[in-house]
Each structure stands twice: as C-alpha cells, then as structure tokens.
Image: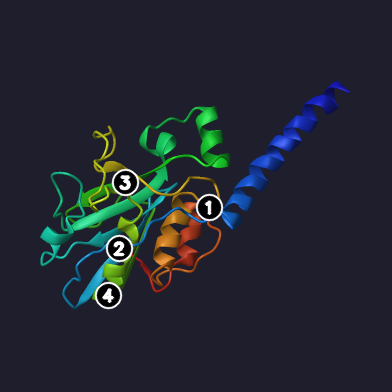
Amino acid sequence: MVRRAVVAPLALLLAFALAFPLLHRALASPDLPPAAAVPAPPEGSYDVWVVDWGYHTAIIVPQPAAVAVDWQLGPPGRETAAWVEYAWGDRRFYRDSDHRPQAVFAALVLPTESVAYVAARDRPPSSGPRAVYRRTVDAATLRALVMELERTIRRHEHGERLLPTAPVAGHAGRFYAAHGKYLWTRDCNAWTVDRLASVGLARGGLVVLAGQVASRLVGFERVI
C-alpha cells in the first residue's frame, strides 16, 4: 500500500510533465507581436549561419555596412557590428545559470519567462561550436529573417528595444526581455527552427534537442 501511495503521485506528475507542454504547444500560440520594421538591405547575396553550441542553437546574420546604422542590431556599444548572433531561452536557466532542480523542472514543464540573447561578432565562428551550418540568401530573405528575429525582443511603444540587463559573466552578448513562454516543447531549439521556418529556411515541427535542428534546415550546408 505504501509503495502504491508513492508511485501514483509520481505517475501523475510524469503524465503532467509530458502532457501539459504538448497540450500547451498545440493550443497556445506564441505571443509574438507583428514583425519589426527593418529597412531593406542592398540587393545581393548574404550568408545566414546556424550554430549548434551543444545543447542550444543560435542564428547569426550579417549586418551590411550600407544599413548598419539604420538597423543597429548589435547590443549596446556594438550596435553596428558586422555580424549579430541571436538566441532565445528560459530566463532563469539560460541568463541566470540557475540549474537547481526546481528551476529546471519549471523551465521544462511550466510556461516560464524567456530572454533573447544578442551578441556582436566580427565574423561567424570558425571553431568552438559542435556544428555550424551556412546558407546563402537574397536581400529580401535576409530582411524577412531579421524582422522575425527582432520581433522576439520586447520593445517600447515607440519601437525601440527594452534595455538589456547588465552584462552577465560568461556571455559576450546581452540579454533582453523576450516574447514567448519557455517549455520543453517550445525550447531554444524549437525557437531556432520556428524563426527559420517562418521565412522558408527550415521545416517546422516538434524540435527539442540541438541535434534535431540540422534535419529541419532547408538548403544549408555544414561547414564545421
């Protein structure tokens, strides 16, 4: 009897941990605002990069010099950087490095607050990530992707991003308040695929692990 009394609540907890995030993904649409307005870059070809850092993925886009002052996608002090890396994740786990069991459980099972990560780069990484993928796109696709990435970040009524939090040790970029709730069915890797899929650079679907992202990419080649 004692064993059954222990097993039953654990079984219910496991069922909730699996079922609720799936139901939430199916019924609740991400609370993303309309795409942010971004001036069109010059006609031409541009490389878009997807980086697998081992447990999470990121998207790196170029910031053409001709529109860098208008775009200013980089974090404070590096607004016009040649390349900008975007990622997204749970506020406590990703930004605060809070890996306590209760924080991990909340991040996986309950809709939790998210952050967007924005880092300036002089060039895409040539070493360090587990894998790197590249695809060449036209100006219209680059603009559409940048608009999709930017609308993840929470903004003031007049359109500017909310100020980022103070620099966080171990992260070269800055963290911004973001739209969308984090769950294991809507994690950082699902975010990467969803943003790319919205502009035809990936196939949508349930993605959880970083290693699943590669199979969803459309037209990318692996360079690392």
Image point 24% across, 74% down: which residue?
139
Between the C-alphas of marks 1 and 4, the distance is 29 Å
Residue 58, percent across and down? 36, 54
- The residue identified by callout 4 is 140
Label 3 close to label 1 by CB (< 8 Å): no
Image point 36% across, 53% down: which residue?
152
Residue flagged by tag 1: what amino acid is it? Val
Q: Earlier in the sequence, mark 2 or mark 1?
A: 2
Q: Earlier in the sequence, mark 2 or mark 3?
A: 3
Residue flagged by tag 4: what amino acid is it? Ala
Image point 64% across, 41% down: which residue?
17
Element marked by disc 4: helix
Q: How many marks?
A: 4
- The residue identified by callout 3 is 117
| 16 on left or right of 133 | right
Residue flagged by tag 3: what amino acid is it? Tyr
How crowded pointer 1 is (Cα within 10 Å; few <14, some 14-19, many 20+) is rated as some
Element marked by disc 2: helix
Between the C-alphas of marks 2 and 3, the distance is 15 Å
- The residue identified by callout 1 is 208
Q: As drawn, which residue projects farthest toward the right? A: 1
Between the C-alphas of marks 4 and 2, the distance is 11 Å
Residue flagged by tag 2: what amino acid is it? Met
- The residue identified by callout 2 is 147
Residue 138 visible in the shown view: no
Q: As drawn, which residue projects farthest toward the front? A: 157
Element marked by disc 1: loop
Q: Earlier in the sequence, mark 3 or mark 1?
A: 3
